[in-house]
Image (cartoon, grey):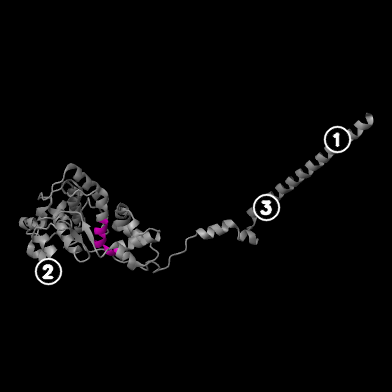
């Protein structure tokens, strides 16, 4: 029995000593590693030392490949087909305005809101049959805005927006005392196509009366539609474009248009009034991977893009246009 026990005890002692030796070696390794790391830290604080990998497998690692593949290539000038964008922004077929015009032109002439002779003098080439009916007759035809008649409809809607009685004109920003009265704006004092002073007709004629719900809709939508000629929304119609858009919103609300429909039409109308601005914006959205017909109208019409300041800031971000261009027309008759 003793012969069997003694070798076993001896083996256990040897194994124990081996483990102690191994532990000592490991401890020495980590001490050395810690000292080396400490030395590196000291050296980087005292000297200009940088460590960069030079192994080819690091340069060709999957991580680096992923970073290269996700980097966006710069868009070169002229790489976007602006002629195709122009057709999308300003369609040749125009935009159908969901309104009923009737004899509003004739009534505004009768009330002196429009001086017929002065108005006709603006259009030396004469008026089309449809334009004649809208101005002096009774039009029950669909109203379509296109490149040819966008200025005509701007002036006609301007007259209506100015003259039609509405709470926005009477209690909105236009009457704020800090501006010295509503008659000092381009949309009011600038209406020179009336008999007498244009401001004499400001919110005076009840051509179209809205329900409480319709007025609330106009109030909401008008605050979300900006124009590139200034920094104000349609709720503050201090220029001809703002006043004309307000008139259009009133007519659309009266005709039962939805909020989304009003935004959609307003964007197309703004595009005809400010073609270069919205071609530029369509270019910007295209660079972001979004076609113009996919852009939400309410988004495109907000201050970030459609106000004068917002448009200019967005214009600076466009990579594929060589230089800024002017967009939009004047704010007078």
Name the residue furthest left.
Answer: 110
How far apart are labels 3 and 2 at the CA level? 87 Å
Dot 2 falls on a residue whose secondary structure is: loop
**Rendered-image quadrant of the C terminus:** bottom left
- Dot 1 falls on a residue whose secondary structure is helix
- Percent from the top left, x then y, of residue 114? 9, 59
The answer to which of 295 and 205 lies nearer the viewer is 295
Which residue corresponds to mark 1?
Answer: 12
In the figure, is residue 245 to the left or right of 120? right
Q: Is residue 112 magenta?
A: no
Residue at the spot of label 3 = 40
| Dot placed on the residue nearer the N-terminal end, 1 or 2 | 1
The location of residue 250, given as percent across then percent down, is 18, 50
Mark 1 Cα within 10 Å, few/some/many (few <14, many 20+)? few
Examine the residues drawn in magenta and state their main secondary structure: helix
Magenta span covers which residues?
266-277
The image quadrant where one finds the N terminus is: top right
Q: Is residue 250 visible?
A: yes
The label on residue 175 is none
Query: Who's the residue at 20% across and 61% down the image?
Result: 145
User: How far across and down, in percent of the image, does residue 279 sit?
Assistant: 31, 63
Q: Quadrant of residue 314?
A: bottom left
User: In the drawing, does residue 308 fall left or right of residue 170?
Assistant: right
How many neighbours does mark 2 have within 10 angstroms: few (below 14), some (14-19), or many (20 or more)? few
| Residue at the top extreme, as displayed | 1
Q: Is residue 327 visible to us here?
A: no
Q: Compare residues 114 and 149 and report the one nearer the observer.
A: 149
Mark 3 to mark 1: distance in Å?
42 Å
């Amino acid at each position: 029995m003793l012969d069997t026990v003694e070798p076993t005890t001896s083996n256990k002692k040897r194994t124990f000593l081996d483990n102690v030796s191994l532990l000592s070696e490991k401890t020495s390794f980590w001490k050395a590693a810690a000292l080396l790391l400490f030395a590196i830290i000291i050296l980087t604080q005292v000297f200009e030392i940088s460590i960069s990998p030079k192994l080819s497998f690091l340069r060709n690692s999957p991580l680096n490949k992923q970073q290269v593949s996700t980097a966006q290539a710069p868009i070169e000038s002229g790489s976007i087909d602006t002629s195709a964008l122009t057709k999308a922004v300003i369609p040749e077929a125009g935009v159908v305005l969901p309104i009923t015009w009737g004899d509003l032109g004739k009534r505004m002439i009768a009330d002196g809101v429009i001086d017929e002779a002065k108005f006709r003098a603006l259009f030396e080439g004469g008026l089309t049959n449809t334009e004649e009916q809208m101005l002096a007759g009774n039009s029950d035809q669909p109203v379509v805005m296109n490149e040819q008649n966008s200025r005509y409809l701007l002036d006609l809607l301007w007259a209506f927006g100015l003259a039609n009685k509405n709470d926005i004109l009477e209690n909105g920003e236009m009457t704020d005392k800090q501006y010295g009265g509503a008659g000092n704006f381009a949309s009011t004092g600038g209406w020179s196509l009336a008999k007498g002073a244009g401001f004499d007709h400001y919110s005076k004629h009840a051509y179209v009366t809205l329900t409480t719900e319709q007025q609330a809709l106009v109030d909401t939508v008008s605050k979300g539609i900006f124009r590139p000629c200034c920094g104000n929304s349609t709720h503050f119609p201090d220029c001809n474009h703002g006043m004309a858009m307000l008139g259009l919103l009133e007519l659309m609300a009266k005709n039962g248009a939805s909020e989304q429909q009003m935004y959609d039409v307003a964007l197309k109308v703004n595009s005809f009034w400010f073609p270069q601005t919205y071609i530029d914006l369509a270019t910007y959205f295209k660079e972001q991977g979004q076609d113009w017909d996919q852009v939400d109208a309410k988004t495109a019409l907000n201050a970030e893009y459609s106000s004068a300041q917002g448009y200019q800031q967005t214009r600076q971000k466009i990579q594929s246009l060589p230089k800024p261009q002017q967009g939009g027309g004047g704010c007078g008759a």
